[in-house]
Amino acid sequence: MAIKSLKTKIAVGVVATGIVASMGTAFAGVDIAGQFNSWYNTKFGAATTKVAVDATIDYGKKLSSYNNEYNQLKTDSTTGVTAYQKDQSDASMLAINKQKNDYITQVNAAADGLSAKAPSDFQGFVNGVNATVDGLKSEAKKYGENGLKSSVEDQSKKSVEQVGKDVAAYQKSSTDNLTATIKDRQDKLNKLIQDQAATSDKAIRANIEAKIAELRAELNDYAKQQVEAAKTNVKAEADTKTAAALAALEAAAVIK
């Protein structure tokens, strides 16, 4: 429509120029300067109209030709952003997996250390209890010997014949009592050791399970945070690159 309008204007200008020229021939004394000025304006209009028409046609051709290049530019830009996003996603996954493996290594190392330490701790506990039992035995023996000695001395004054029997009977009673006491204490301490060992084992295992659960939850949250951060970075990069591409496109869309 624009090209047709320009052609119409050119035709009208040519006709007007002919009419003015014929009038100049028919009438003497007409202002020749004014006619010349009119002729110039006609020529100028025709020349500029042709330039405008040719430029418009050429611009349309070049714009149509650039359209394919522009579409390829859009495709390349989109592909570049997608590839960058994939690289960032892969890098995030590798970082998260590495951190997870580091935590698991630390947990396993701590658990192995506790497993190796527990037997020596309980052995130390047993040694301490046994030392206490041994001390009680020594005290009981000392007490029994003192009592026996006193009894023997008292009884020896009253009855030489009964002293052997009395001492033997008392000694047996004391020994039986001491032996029963030691055995009873040992049985109770063994039961205590077993109960404490089972309780300790249960507590350690429960703590390990709790820490693994905490680790799992924390790493899941951390993974979500890293993914959101990566998405934000990719979006920002995409916006920046798109704005730059549009600016370059706008700058290129100028006929010089």
Image: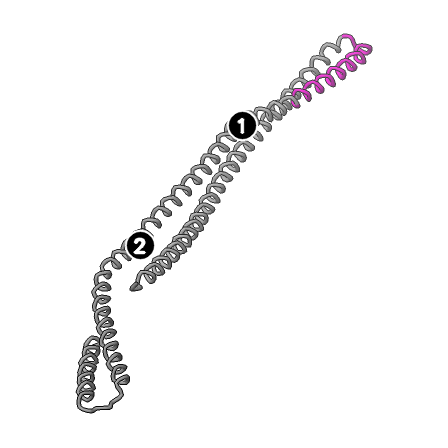
Residue 219 position, x and y percent, is 45, 45
Choose mark 2 or mark 1, whichever is in front.
2
The residue sitting at 21% across, 61% down in the picture is 65
Sequence-wise first label, 2 or 1: 2
Magenta residues span 132-160
Q: Are marks 2 and 1 in contact (CB under 8 Å)?
A: no
Residue 4 position, x and y percent, is 18, 77
Q: Nearer the viewer, residue 26 or 101?
A: 26
The residue sitting at 59% across, 24% down in the picture is 124
Taken as a whole, is the magenta stretch helix, strand or loop? helix
Q: In the displayed structure, would residue 112 be above or below residue 251?
A: above
Q: Is residue 137 magenta?
A: yes
Q: Nearer the viewer, residue 74 or 57?
A: 57
Q: Nearer the viewer, residue 102 or 208?
A: 102
Q: Which mark is residue 117?
A: 1
Furthest residue toward right? 157
Residue 152 position by quadrant: top right
Q: Describe residue 221's horizontal placement relative to residue 22 as left or right.
A: right
Mark 2 is on which residue type? Ser
Q: Which residue is mark 2?
A: 77
Residue 10 position, x and y percent, is 20, 79
